[in-house]
Amino acid sequence: MRNRTWAGAWSAMRLVMAALIIAAIVAQLSASVGTAAELGRDVATTVANFFSFFTILSNSLAAVVLAWAGLWHFTRGRGAHVEPPALAMALACVTTYMIITGVVYNWLLRSIELPQGSAPIPWSNELLHLIGPLFLLVDLFVGPRRRALPWRAVWGIIAFPILWVLYTLLRGPLVTNPVSRDPFWYPYPFLNPNNPGGWTEVAFWIVVISAAFLVVATLVVWWGRRVGAERELDHRTGDHLEEEWDEARESAME
């Protein structure tokens, strides 16, 4: 009963966090679009650039998956032993992405102005770069009904960041920066080959951040496997005890 109460409470918190993340994204997007329109910048490019930030993509995915997890619990999951495989994989993905988002931003980017088209809204900025990542980190350890994923899930988790890096590097020289009018646009300075370090520095940071993704994804899957294995053992033990109780009751009635 206690576990069910906790599962319901945490599922409600997942829904609240999903709503807060969406509100933060909408607030910053509105500010960026409003500034672009006011200053006569290309609005379409501003919107495309906004959704090219890994922070925005990871938070958008996190909001969707947290909402999915919360709604699943209240519609189908109350009597379930573990979460569905697709939901488990999605949670592992967004947990990894949000942890990396929090670490990279607070380690490398907090003091740097990013080309998002307008000044960051303080509460939105903190929610997307600190509160959201911390929530997903906590969710990893306390989220209910965690399913054990196979080790090959690690490669599925890191596929999206790899595709995002390729997209960023291919798109960068094809876009005119709507703010500075430079003939290129990159969301983060460490991916901009036009900076003094050139491609050598870009390659270095790609290797470093790729390694970080691999490590975090491995830890997320490892923890899920550990918790999932413990839950499966508890479930089987409970089923075994229930069977013994039924057998004893039937023997007493004979």
Image: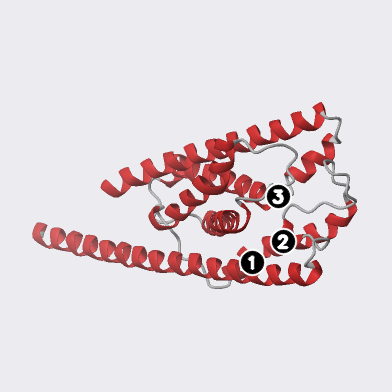
Q: Residue at x 84, y 60 (%)?
A: 170
Q: Residue at x 75, y 28 (%)?
A: 34
- Quarter-wise, where is residue 26 in the image? top right
- Circle 3 packing at 10 Å, graded few (<14), some (14-19), many (20+), is some
Assess whether mark 2 and mark 1 are in contact (beta carbons under 8 angstroms): yes
Q: Nearer the viewer, residue 170 or 19?
A: 170
Residue assigned mark 2: 190
> Which amino acid lies under the numbered mark 2 shown in the image of this protein?
Phe
Give the SS element for disc 3: loop
Q: Residue 180 in the image: x percent, y percent?
A: 84, 44
Tell which tag, 3 or 2, sits nearer the viewer.
2
Q: Nearer the viewer, residue 191 or 159?
A: 191
Side (left or right) of 3 relative to 137: left
Q: Residue 212 in the image: x percent, y percent?
A: 58, 68
Q: Residue at x 76, y 32 (%)?
A: 33
Q: Residue 210 in the image: x percent, y percent?
A: 65, 69
The residue at the far top in this view is 38
Q: CA distance from mark 1 to mark 3?
A: 15 Å
